[in-house]
Image (spheres, grey):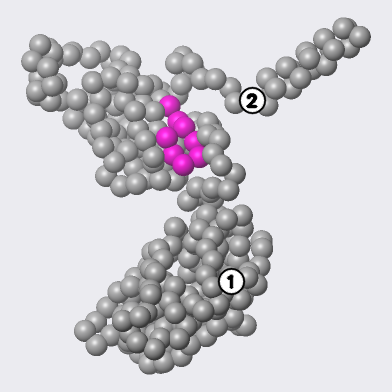
């Protein structure tokens, strides 16, 4: 009996070792070159949540959500932090420190290696590759922007514009809700805007809100503005047709209220068109 239990335990440990994420040690980290006076841009496929630089010899910032900008600390900056710091003379291929980048679903680490400024092969930007990513376990109900983009692209491939759930027309504009999709705790609105005039349309805002169905007095109207967590295309201008996917965290509202969607043109006397979406339309959402 003990022999059987020992065998089962050994098997479980072996399986666990094969499926677990492998620990990283410094010697196994990929190297990236960095040179004095030249910024290194690390480009992430999803928004960066956190960056760690293991040494004061490196400094950096986040100019945008998907890019980490890192450089070797200037001698003057080092002296301001601590007067006793003396200028460092780096040799080619010196190891400067560890750069850690954390996205929404992964962590990537690199060894920063000094390259002489006379080198013609100095790297100025790198894209984080899949082989450099280690997955981070989050709540299974949460998706990264990269995953939301993939789902939205899958929806775009569907031809669902001919039989919209809702449609409004005014000012030679057509504004339609093609379909509603749901996956996990996320709601995807597939929408198309069509401009039948010869004047191009500049979008000032596309506003989503939950409002009362019947408004007896304007002062009694309770409007709750909603912001999409993600949109596939941030386009602000279209001439004829524009289709986009807007993603929201799961929401509910009573039958006494409706979801209002307002498309507002970027002009003093701009064309504004609005649509009411009943909760029943959300409840009938498709899965994919």
Q: Residue at x 62, y 83 (%)?
A: 163
Task: Identify the residue at the far right of this view.
Answer: 1
The disc label shown at residue 20, or none: 2
Residue visible at 40% across and 86% down?
215
Q: Distance of mark 2 from mark 1, alpha carbons?
A: 39 Å
Quadrant containing the C terminus is bottom right
Q: In which image quadrant can residue 240 be found?
A: bottom left
Whether residues under marks 2 and 1 lie with C-beta atoms below 8 angstroms apart, the answer is: no
Characterize the magenta stretch by its predominant secondary structure: strand
State whether residue 76 is above or below residue 143: above
- Label 2: few (<14), some (14–19) or many (≥20) C-alpha neighbours in 10 Å: few
**Residue 103 belongs to the span the image colors magenta:** yes
Asked whether residue 9 appears in the rendered view, the answer is yes
- Between 170 and 252, the residue placed more toward the observer is 252
Comparing 204 with 7, the one in front is 7
The residue under label 1 is 282
Element marked by disc 1: helix
Q: Is residue 264 left or right of residue 269?
A: right
> Which numbered disc, 2 or 1, marks the residue that appears first in the sequence?
2
The magenta segment: 102-109
User: Relative to residue 274, is residue 147 depicted above or below?
Assistant: above
Image quarter of the N terminus? top right
User: Considering the numbered disc 2 on the image, is that residue within a helix, a strand or a loop?
Assistant: loop
* Residue 62 place in picture, x, y as percent: 29, 41
Q: Is residue 75 visible?
A: no
């Amino acid at each position: 009996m003990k022999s059987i239990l020992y065998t089962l335990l050994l098997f479980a440990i072996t399986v666990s070792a094969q499926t677990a994420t492998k620990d990283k040690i410094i010697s196994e980290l990929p190297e990236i070159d960095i040179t004095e006076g030249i910024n290194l841009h690390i480009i992430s496929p999803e928004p960066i949540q956190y960056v760690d630089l293991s040494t004061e010899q490196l400094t950096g910032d986040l100019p945008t959500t998907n890019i980490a900008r890192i450089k070797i600390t200037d001698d003057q900056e080092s002296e301001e932090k601590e007067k006793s710091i003396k200028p460092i003379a780096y040799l080619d291929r010196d190891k400067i420190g560890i750069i850690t980048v954390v996205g929404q679903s992964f962590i990537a680490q690199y060894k920063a290696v000094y390259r002489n400024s006379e080198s013609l092969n100095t790297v100025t930007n790198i894209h984080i590759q899949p082989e450099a990513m280690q997955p981070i376990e989050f709540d299974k109900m949460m998706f990264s922007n990269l995953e939301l983009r993939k789902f939205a692209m899958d929806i775009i491939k569907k031809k669902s514009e001919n039989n919209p759930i809702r449609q409004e027309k005014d000012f030679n504009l057509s504004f339609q809700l093609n379909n509603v999709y749901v996956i996990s705790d996320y709601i995807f609105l597939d929408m198309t805007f069509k401009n039948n005039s010869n004047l191009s349309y500049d979008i000032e805002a596309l506003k989503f809100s939950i409002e009362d169905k019947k408004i007896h007095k304007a002062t009694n109207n309770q409007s709750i503005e909603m912001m999409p967590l993600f949109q596939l295309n941030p386009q602000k201008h279209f001439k004829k047709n524009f289709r986009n996917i807007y993603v929201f965290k799961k929401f509910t509202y009573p039958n006494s209220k409706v979801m209002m969607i307002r498309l507002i043109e970027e002009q003093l006397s701009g064309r504004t068109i609005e649509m009411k979406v009943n909760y029943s339309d959300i409840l009938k959402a498709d899965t994919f």
